[in-house]
Every structure is written in C-alpha cells, then in structure tokens.
Amino acid sequence: MKNTKLGDQEETIVEMLEPEAELDRQLVSSAKETRNQAIRYILWGLISVAVNFAVYYITYNVLGIEYQMANGITWVIAVQVAFWVDRVKVFEHHSQYVYREMGKFYATRIVTYFIEALILWLLVSVIGSPMLLAKVFGQVGAIVGNFLFSKWFVFQSK
C-alpha cells in the first residue's frame, strides 16, 4: 500500500478508508438486522394473523356481530397477542418500559386499525367486494404499517 504523508504522520490508504468501511459494515449490519426482523415478523406474525382471522370468524359468522364491531373486538385481542410476540420473538426487545412500549404499540395499532377499517369499508360497502377478500387486503395494509411502526417507533434501540 502506498503511504500518504500527512504532516509528521504517515497513513496508509487502508487506514484512511477505515471509517468509510466501518460505516459500510454498519449499514450492511443494519439492513441485515431489518431483513431478519422482517422474516421473524412474518413468521411469528402468523400467530397474530391466525388469532385475528379466528376471532373475526367467530364474532362475525358464529355470533352474528356486525362486521365493523367484529373487527374491533378482533383488533383488541390480536393486538395484545401481537405485542408480546413482537417484543419477545421479533425484535427481541428487553427494556424496563413495558407499559410505555405497550402504549406506543396500541397507539400505532390504532392508526393501522383505521387503515384496515377504511379498506374494509371501501371494499365491502362502496365497491361490494366479498368480505374475505376485503379482510385480506385490510390485513396486508395493516401488517406493513405495523412492522414499520414497531421497528422505527415502538421497539427502537436507543
């Protein structure tokens, strides 16, 4: 390696580029961590989705509750399941602020609940789509939003 003279100090090209290389490693590490979290989110999230669909099926089809009310009941139960799954298995987050995190989690889930409710309303009441198809589209919108909120707001490492 060619040395560069910097005052009384010699520095190799490798040494000069080391801070940039470290930044590249951090970016790759961060992207890899996000990818792994997304994979865990999808796999472990199937539990929450299963709970969501099971409770929705029971409340809407078995108990005959109106679809938006059934969706609300479903939401409360599925969010509590999702909080613990995401905290423990997806983001492997350990802090002493469980209730603060839970508050943030519920707040962000309220936002995505309204997104899902809007999608359900548009597809079922406005367009006339089948209920199951609307529910699937609503869940996709909620899942993407939930991951991003959890990653960047709820379970962020400080």
Image (cartoon, rainbow, N blue to C red):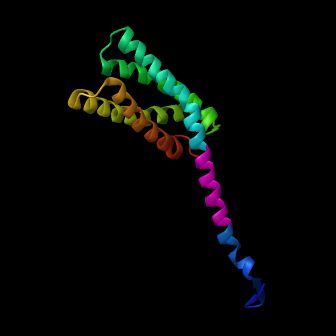
Work out whether residue 140 or residue 150 is closer to the camera in this orientation and state it.
140
Image point (45%, 17%), residue name:
55
Visible residue check, residue 98? no
Report the residue that reaches farthest toward the top.
63
Residues in magenta, as a range: 22-36
Tell me: 157 left or right of 56.
right
Q: Position of residue 45 (x, y in %)?
A: 54, 32
Residue 66: quarter of image: top left
Image point (42%, 21%), residue name:
74
Image point (43%, 41%), residue name:
145
Q: Position of residue 154 (x, y in %)?
A: 52, 40
Q: Is residue 30 magenta?
A: yes
Work out whether residue 153 or residue 60 is closer to the camera in this orientation and state it.
60
Q: Position of residue 11 (x, y in %)?
A: 76, 83
Q: Is residue 49 magenta?
A: no
Q: Main secondary structure of the magenta part?
A: helix
Q: Considering the image in quadrants, where does the N terminus appear?
A: bottom right
Q: Position of residue 151 (x, y in %)?
A: 53, 44
Work out whether residue 82 or residue 99 is closer to the camera in this orientation and state it.
82
Report the residue that reaches farthest toward the left.
126
Image point (47%, 42%), residue name:
149
